[in-house]
Image (spheres, rainbow, N blue to C red):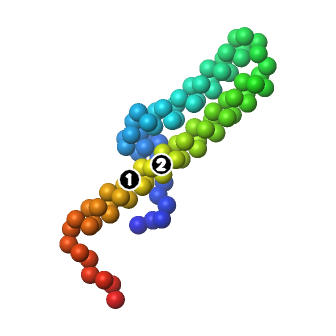
Amino acid sequence: MSVRGTFSFAELFRAAPVKSSLLGFGPLGLAAGQLINSYVNGVSPLVAVGFAAVMIAFAVVATGHHAAEVRLQRLETTIEADSDGEPRPDPE
């Protein structure tokens, strides 16, 4: 078993669709909305771009944290499944 498995967004979406959507698309939607709002209302683009950058960074970090949660859940499920079966002989 590899120490660090990577999940695609599709795998994360299959594991928890609502949480994956909120963490992946929510911040990106807010960033796009702020950029559009800035353009429509004539607000300085620096404010909107800064906000968008923070929201994109949040989406990346939150999705990474969500992937770690899914990895931990799968590891715990694997350990429970292994412990329910026959005991393994000690390798010598």
Q: In this view, does 85 lie above or below 88?
A: above
Task: Look at 38% across and 53% down and name the residue there.
Answer: 73
Q: Residue 92 carries which label?
A: none
Q: Which of marks 1 and 2 is nearer the N terminus?
A: 2
Give coordinates of residue 70: x percent, y percent: 42, 49
Task: Look at 67% across and 35% down and name the residue there.
Answer: 54
Q: Residue 73 carries which label?
A: 1
Amino acid of disc 2:
Ala
Q: Is residue 38 above or below residue 86?
A: above
Amino acid of disc 1:
Gln
Task: Look at 70% across and 11% down and name the residue there.
Answer: 40
82 to the left or right of 41: left
29 to the left or right of 7: right
Which SS class for mark 2? Answer: helix
Give coordinates of residue 87: x percent, y percent: 23, 75
Give coordinates of residue 12: x percent, y percent: 43, 43
Which residue is at the far bottom?
A: 92
Q: Nearer the viewer, residue 75 or 2?
A: 75
